[in-house]
Image (tube, rainbow, N blue to C red):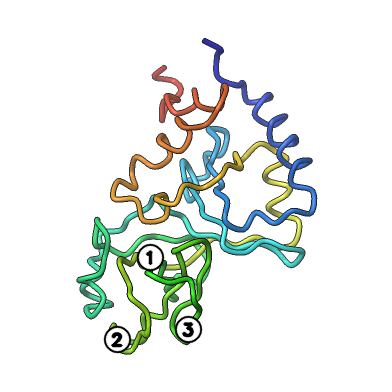
Amino acid sequence: MQPPLTMGQTAMRGRENLRDMGTTSLKGRLLVATPSLQEPTFDRTVILMLEHGAEGALGLVLNRPSEVELAGPAPDWEPFATHPPVVFFGGPVAQGSAICLARAGSEEQTEAWTPLFGRLGALNIGKSPSEVDQPIDEVRVFSGHAGWGPGQLEGEVAAGAWFVVDADPEDALSPQPLELWRRVLRRQKGRVALYAGFPADPALN
């Protein structure tokens, strides 16, 4: 079995990711925090990228559930909430705003529904379920989002702060969000998968 990458090798892998990125948008992919990213806001986060281009990038942290029940701010949508039925911390930007991801039965855009990838899309929960002309299966609401200015994300990837990996259709609405960081790493190929066993406190290893 190969050992996990060292921090220097992680940065090298980040630079390789950056070269692979080129001008390709990361929309629809995941950013997985490497162990070198110990800033509390993003430590061990998994971020689904919703936008990425020359003007910057926007994503949602998928694995930070709060203790706020969705029934409080959005009671009409609580019956549609996937487990756990709470509001999630989507990121430090615009904490007063909400973004709702939902899985629907159609990929056709409507006034309240914007498809993103496959059956996953953004839902306007300012409308009641009866006003949404779309069969909604389940929803998850995020408070705030993660954002990067032009070139900022590329610099962080080059520095080895993030692994850039493909998303699984179940990641965004995972019923076990606290296990998502390890699960996403575990399914990767090669030495990156070994990071799934990396201790939260390396001093205890």
- In the rendered structure, are the residues bearing label 1 and label 2 in contact, judged by CB atoms less than 8 Å apart? no
Reply above or below: 16 against 91.
above
Considering depth in this image, is 61 or 204 the residue closer to the camera? 61
Quarter where residue 103 is shown: bottom left
Q: Is residue 37 left or right of residue 19?
A: left
- Residue furthest to the bottom in view is 131
- Residue 126 placement (x, y as % from top left): 37, 85
Q: Determine the residue positioned at 33% across, 75% down.
A: 135
Is residue 110 rendered to the left or right of residue 23? Answer: left
| Rendering coords of residue 104 (x, y %) | 38, 69
- Residue 184 occupies quadrant: top left
Q: Give left or right: position of 124 versus 76.
A: right
Q: Nearer the viewer, residue 142 or 200?
A: 142
Residue occupying image coordinates x 41% and y 80%: 124
Residue depth check, mark 3 versus mark 2: number of the one nearer the observer: 3
**Looking at the rendered structure, which numbered label has been put on residue 103?**
1
Which residue appears farthest toward the top when viewing the image? 1
Q: CA distance from mark 3 to mark 1?
A: 14 Å
Name the residue at 56% across, 12% down: 2
Q: Are marks 3 and 1 in contact (CB under 8 Å)?
A: no
Residue to which mark 3 is pinned? 110
Residue on which the image places disc 2: 128
